[in-house]
Image (cartoon, rainbow, N blue to C red):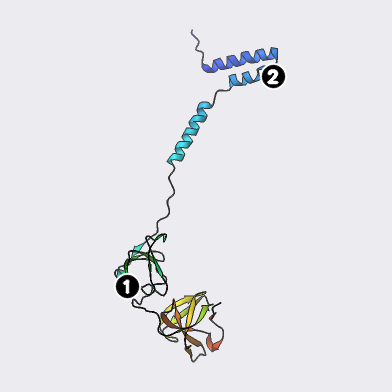
Amino acid sequence: MVQRVTRTDKLLSYGGLVAGVAGLLGASVFAPLAAQAIAPSTDSLDKSGLKESAGLLAQAPIAQAADVQVFERPSYVNTCRNSGASTLAVYTSTAQGTVVRQLQPYTRITLTGVLGDGVAQIREPAVGWVRSATLLANCDARPPVDPVGQCYQVTQPELVVRSAPYDTILSSVLSGDRIYGTNPVQRQTTADGRIWQRVYYRGTTNLGWVAETGTGGIGINFVRCP
């Protein structure tokens, strides 16, 4: 019968021979040779592993920035707004990175009806995206004729703005927002002792009434600007 000798058998035989000679001449001399004879080479494994890792890295997807959700409000299509009391930047996208135009205060603009989180798309006088927080519903708003008076800063979490004391709600202002009194100051005291003041809010074109105090004239809802 022909005996088949494998590569492993050869390695073990060679290792045994080296070990035997080492016993005669001293193990310290042949220890490296014995270890090399018994242990298989890992060069090919290491290289293939590195190649595989490199392939995985090359195939890894590149992270993309999250898209901003937008939606269309049909009732806003081709409706007008006013840019407000400050210069308004028009951006190329909702990311608000590149400015394509700066609109002067109180510029009439036209909406496309497409909105996002805090932004609105416009088509005139330029195509792009603007921040919607300072837009005015009064398309033809102009700088106030009456002089603007004292600047105040709201101290309450939210302060309702009305068309007259205890009348229709127009809007609201939040803690830290600035409002401006008229010049001269316009105040009213209602039957419950609450003091009201007529103020400009969200710029200097919108006028409304806010409660300066609580009932009985107690407390204060805004203070002079620092």
Amino acid type, residue under disc 2 in the picture: Ser
On the image, the x and y values in percent for residue 138 come to 35, 77
On the image, the x and y values in percent for residue 174 come to 49, 75
Number of marks in the rendered image: 2
Q: How crowded is mark 1: few (under 14 residues within 10 Å), some or many (20 or more)?
A: many
On the image, the x and y values in percent for residue 114 come to 33, 65
- Asked if the residue under mark 1 is in contact with the one under mark 2, i.e. CB atoms within 8 Å, the reply is no
Is 158 left or right of 82, judged from the image as shown? right
In this rendering, the answer to whether 125 lies above or below 163 is above
Q: Dot 2 lies on which element?
A: helix
Is 161 left or right of 124, judged from the image as shown? right
Q: Would you name the residue on which mark 1 appears?
A: 80
Residue at image location 60% in from the left, 16% down from the top: 15
Q: Would you name the residue on which mark 2 appears?
A: 28
Q: Nearer the viewer, residue 167 or 76?
A: 76
Mark identifier at residue 222:
none
Mark whose residue sits in front, 2 or 1: 1
Q: Dot 1 lies on which element?
A: strand
In this rendering, the answer to whether 10 lies above or below 143 is above
Locate residue 167: give its quadrant: bottom left
In this rendering, the answer to whether 49 lies above or below 224 is above
